[in-house]
Image (cartoon, rainbow, N blue to C red):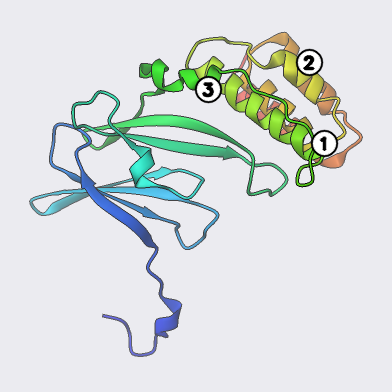
Amino acid sequence: MADDNEDPSDFRNDVESYTFTNLDNGPLYLVATDDGGSTWFQYFELIRCKQHRCHQITIHSDPSIDLDKQLLDLKMDGRHQILAEVCVCVEASRQGAYLPYIYEISNNKVIDSSKKYPEYYRPWLAPIKHRVPDNLNSQDMIDKGYAESLFEQHDVERRIFGKAIAGLSDALQWEKSKDTAIIQLAIETYVRIDSPEADAGLKRLAQSDIPYIRDSARQTQTWKALKHPH
C-alpha cells in the first residue's frame, strides 16, 4: 500500500513484458523485462519460487529486449536459452557494436554457454559489405558502421571460434582514424587480445594527443594489467 504522502505520479511500472518458461529441469521461471527506471539499461529478471522461497536472477542486455527473439530453444527440447546483447557504445553514444552472448540457467545460476552453440554464431562470419554514401549516409557514417560490424565479427571469431588475434590487423588501422569512435574500437580490440602487438597498440594510444583517447587507453592498460598480470 502506498503512503498517503507519496505522489502516485512518482511511481512507474518498469515491467515491459513477461512470460513463464522452462530454463532447466526445475519449475518454470517468470521471465520479465524491465529498464530499471532508465531506458538506457535493459534487463532480464528471472524469478522462480518454490514453496515460500523465491530466487531472482538479473541479466543485463542493452537493446530493447524482445522475448520472442531472445528466448531461444537451440536444442529443440523445450528448455530455453537467453540471448543477451552488450553494446560497445563509446562517447556516450546509444548506438554501437553489439556483442551477443547466450546464457543458460542451471540451479538458479547463470552460465555463459555461447561456445556450446557455434552454429548459431556462424552467420556472423559472413563477409561484410562496405556500402557507398547516399543521401542518408555520409562516408564517415558508413566507415563507422563498417568498423562496428567488423568489431562484432571479430569478437565472435575470438570468443566462439578460438581465433585469438582476430581483429588485430583492423585495430592497427583503426587507431590511425580521425574518428575517435573508431579509435575507441581499436582500444576495445587491444584489451581483448593478449599479444605484444595489442599491448604496444594500447601503449601508443596512451600517448595520444587526444585527451579522451589518451585517458581511455591508460584506463584500459590498467584494467588489462590487473586482469592478465605477467
Residue 88 lies in what quarter of the image? Answer: top right
Q: Residue at x 76, y 47 (%)?
A: 136
Q: Which residue is most to the front?
A: 135
Depth check, front residue: 58 or 227: 58
Depth check, front residue: 109 or 178: 178
Q: Residue at x 76, y 23 (%)?
A: 202
Q: Which image quadrant: the N terminus? A: bottom left
Check disc 1: other Cα within 10 Å, few if <14, some if 14-19, many if 20+. Answer: few
84 relative to 197, above or below: below
Q: Name the residue under label 1.
A: 139
Check disc 3: other Cα within 10 Å, few if <14, some if 14-19, many if 20+. Answer: some
Q: Which residue is drawn at 21% across and 43% down?
A: 21
Q: Viewer-nearest of labels 1 and 2?
A: 1
Q: Which image quadrant: the C terminus? A: top right
Q: Name the residue under label 3.
A: 124
From the viewer's perspective, tell me whether residue 48 is left or right of residue 113. left
Name the N-terminal-most of marks 3 and 1: 3
Q: Which residue is drawn at 52% across and 58% down?
A: 39
Say which amino acid is labelled 3. Answer: Trp
129 relative to 89, above or below: above
Say which amino acid is labelled 2. Answer: Ala
Q: Mark 2 points at which residue?
A: 200
In 3D space, how far apart are the residues under numbered discs 3 and 1 (Cα atoms)? 23 Å
